Image (tube, rainbow, N blue to C red):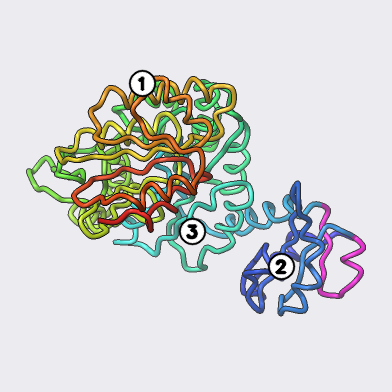
């Protein structure tokens, strides 16, 4: 006999939350057994009970019979998603879903900072934005939440639609359409179709979309939406020494800690959402000005006399081009680019990395460093670049130099772990 969602909801309310990993399990939490290609959480259910779990939810009947606090469901992942949706429906609050190729997490964090000026606001922790992360986010939402900002990620068509059914957004925003996850989407058109699933959900559920009026593609995609709010609204970007600034129509200016012109769209989105929900403009812009990026997303790091822009959490052709062009516009010299592979591009990978080499060659960087397998294709246009196939040789080379006075951009996909270079860069 399978445990029903109302029964699971009762267990959830009596527990301290849900955990899917015994290594981080806290006493009183429910251990939720999930299965993947190389793991089976059912194997750890009894261990979790012994470690203090209030209960374990499993989809293996033999495990369920082994302990009275093991609760059987037909499918662990589907049950987790159903429970999260059930909890979401207990909240009669606005929920803003944010998706897109680039800038999702930054926009989410900025929006959360702005909305927190007037509400008990909740936002997706970290980037728990997939078919497991979104349910876990909803289950972590405090009971007194007044407004929520949930990040939705995808690497294949149909995923955003499924996440919308779980999170039930009342509002939504697509940051942009870029060449990300082409291995799963197949093409730029595939990326657009996948992200437009958010617009379709809002359309059929009478939701409201926030749309960047400067983005022709998004404006075309949103043209059928009767309820849409366009941005920017009365602000414009100011180019600062390193960071983008903001100017209001009244002439008030604000500095930010956000590197790159491309971040203005993220700022404008958060500003617009804040105004829509009644946040005073000065409060919204002050919250944006105080936000400091972290977790390797355009993060400025100063190591002695070296200034580093660490943007190594994610990379695709669109975000790579934006970062490199913004870095090239900096008036400071000398400048060094450290670039690693852009992953999950499928059959387009070689062409994308050749194009990357051509882009880099169009600028006068003092040094260009390439690391990885795929990025080797860029060498066709960068004969004077320093190329390293492995981290060991890259780290040794960096450590043997002195980089005092240098301005360095580090950009690659997360899987390249280019943050590992930081201890080897010194002045």
Residue 427: name its quadrant. Answer: bottom left
- Mark 1, mark 2: which one is toward the viewer? 1
Tags 1 and 2 in contact by the CB under 8 Å rule? no
First in sequence, mark 3 or 2: give its number: 2
- Mark 3, mark 1: which one is toward the viewer? 1
The circle on residue 125 is 3
Magenta range: 61-74
Q: Position of residue 241 (x, y in %)?
A: 14, 44
Residue at position x 71%, y 79% in the image: 52
Q: Which residue is mark 2?
A: 31
Marker count (numbered): 3
Q: Residues within 10 Å of mark 2 (few under 14, many from 20)?
A: many
Residue at position x 33%, y 57% in the image: 113
Q: Which residue is mark 1?
A: 358
Tags 3 and 1 in contact by the CB under 8 Å rule? no
Q: Position of residue 71 (x, y in %)?
A: 82, 66
Whether residue 317 sits left or right of residue 25 in the image: it is left
| The N terminus sits in image quarter | bottom right
């Amino acid at each position: 006999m399978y445990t029903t969602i109302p029964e699971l909801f009762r267990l959830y309310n009596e527990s301290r939350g849900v955990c899917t990993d015994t290594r981080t399990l806290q006493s009183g939490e429910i251990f939720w057994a999930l299965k993947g290609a190389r793991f089976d959480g059912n194997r750890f259910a009894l261990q979790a009970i012994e470690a203090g779990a209030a209960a374990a939810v499993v989809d293996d009947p033999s495990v369920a019979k082994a302990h009275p606090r093991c609760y059987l469901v037909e499918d662990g992942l589907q049950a987790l998603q159903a429970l999260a949706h059930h909890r979401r429906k207990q909240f009669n609050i606005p929920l803003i879903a944010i998706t897109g190729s680039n800038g999702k997490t930054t926009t989410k964090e900025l929006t959360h900072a702005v909305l927190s000026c007037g509400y008990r606001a909740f936002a997706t922790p970290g980037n728990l934005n997939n078919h497991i992360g979104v349910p876990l986010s909803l289950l972590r939402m405090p009971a007194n939440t007044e407004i929520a900002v949930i990040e939705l990620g995808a690497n294949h068509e149909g995923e955003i639609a499924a996440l919308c059914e779980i999170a039930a957004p009342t509002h939504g925003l697509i940051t942009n359409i870029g060449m990300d996850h082409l291995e799963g989407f197949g093409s730029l058109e595939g990326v657009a179709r996948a992200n437009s699933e958010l617009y379709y959900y809002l359309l059929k559920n009478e939701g409201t979309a926030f749309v960047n009026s400067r983005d022709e593609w998004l404006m075309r995609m949103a043209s059928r939406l009767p309820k849409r709010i366009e941005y920017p609204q009365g602000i414009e970007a100011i180019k600062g020494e390193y960071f983008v600034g903001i100017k209001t129509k009244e002439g008030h200016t604000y500095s930010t800690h956000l590197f790159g012109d491309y971040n203005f769209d993220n700022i404008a989105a958060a500003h617009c959402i804040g105004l829509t929900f009644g946040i005073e403009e000065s409060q919204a812009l002050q919250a944006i000005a105080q936000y400091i990026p972290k977790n390797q997303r355009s993060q400025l790091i100063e190591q002695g006399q070296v200034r580093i822009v660490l943007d190594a959490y994610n990379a695709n052709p669109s975000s790579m081009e934006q970062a490199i062009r913004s870095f090239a516009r900096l008036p400071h010299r000398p400048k060094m680019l450290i670039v690693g592979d852009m992953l999950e591009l499928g059959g387009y990978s070689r062409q994308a990395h050749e194009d990357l080499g051509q882009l880099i060659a169009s600028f006068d960087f003092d040094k260009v460093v390439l690391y990885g397998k795929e990025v080797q294709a860029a060498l066709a246009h960068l004969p004077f670049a320093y190329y390293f196939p492995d981290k060991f040789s890259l780290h040794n080379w960096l450590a043997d130099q002195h980089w005092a006075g240098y301005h360095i951009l580090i950009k690659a996909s997360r899987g390249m772990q280019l943050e590992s270079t930081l201890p080897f860069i010194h002045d």
